[in-house]
Image (cartoon, helix red, strand yellow):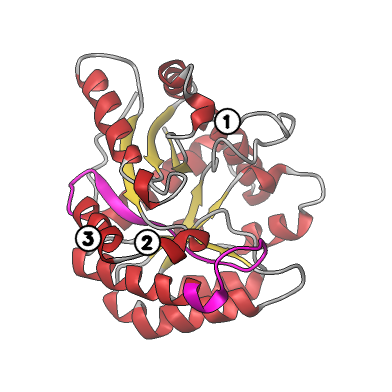
Amino acid sequence: MLIDSHAHLDSSRYADDRAAMLARAAQAGVGAVLSIGIGEGPAEMHRALDICREFNAQRAAGAHLPQLYASAGVYPHNTEEMDTAVLAKLDGLLAEPEVIACGEIGLDYFHQGAPHDVQRQGLVRQLEIAAARKRPIAIHCRPKDGGADAWNHLFESLEEHWRRTGLGGIMHCFGGGWDEARRSLDLGFLISFAGNLTYPKAQALRDVAHRVPLDNLLVETDAPWLAPAPHRGKRNEPAMVVETAQVLAGLLGMEREEISAATTKNFFRLFHLRPDVGN
């Protein structure tokens, strides 16, 4: 069984075939998906939970679908929208049992968006709420090309406000170098690789993945984006996490089934879940 540790199931790109898309994931051996709750902004961050409940009910009734979990968070470029009502909504969502993570949250200095200081303040406020609710976090970090400011600022915030919680989290769609991976591991994070691991020009990323201990690895799609080769440019979906896992297995000289078992075990350990979802 595989787990897709990060997918945007609430994307409008699934509006016409969401049920069929999830059925394809189950058929491919994906036993669970973490549905990321950032929406197009804070007003929609509940939609991941709604989808989770809708399809888990169908699964309980006998449909062959993955187990869904949800997250909730405010994306870096939406941190300007954070007010008392948004923070209260986030806190309430994190109190729901199906919402197992806060995210994706973090820093994005690559795209033009919220000022960096606003992003950092928004990150810290969400770390405080996640800590109070005892929820691990899913981190997004994207620096400017060739820059390290986003990573350095991220680690400063995590060292000051997160390390002491011991809750850890996921470095989602990891794109840093070995130094960033090492610092993430030191903070208790799992490192999740997406479809870009399979791209021909991503050898530097594959070199990093090769060095990450097996107990600290996850795989994801970041669907509907970052479809793995040879589907690059097409709509991604959770079934395609199998192809990223296959590439990761090859890097480590393992069978895909071994990677599947290890990453599933890592996911359950991080979120203190029972390994009782299967196909």
Residue 217: x and y in percent read 50, 55
In percent of width and height, residue 102 lies at 34, 57
Picture residue at 59% right of the left edge, 44% below the top: 254
Q: Is residue 99 magenta?
A: yes
> What's the mark number on residue 240?
1
Q: Nearer the viewer, residue 207 or 87?
A: 87
Badge 1 amino acid: Met
First to last magenta residue range: 95-118
Q: Residue at x 39, y 40 (%)?
A: 35
Q: Is residue 183 left or right of residue 34?
A: right
* Residue carrying label 3: 88
Residue 213 in view (yes/no): no
Tell me which amino acid carries mark 2: Ile
Q: Say left or right for 59 vs 239.
A: left
Question: Which SS class for mark 1?
Answer: helix
Q: Residue 144: x and y, percent?
A: 71, 69
Please tell me in which quadrant of the rendered image residue 33 appears: top left
- Mark carried by residue 21: none
Badge 2 marks a residue whose secondary structure is: strand
Q: Work out whether 113 lies above or below 267.
A: below
**Label disc, if present, on residue 137 of the rendered structure:** 2
Q: Does residue 173 show up? A: yes
Q: Distance between the Cα atoms at labels 3 and 1? A: 35 Å
Indicate the quadrant containing the C terminus: top left, top right, bottom left or bottom right: top left
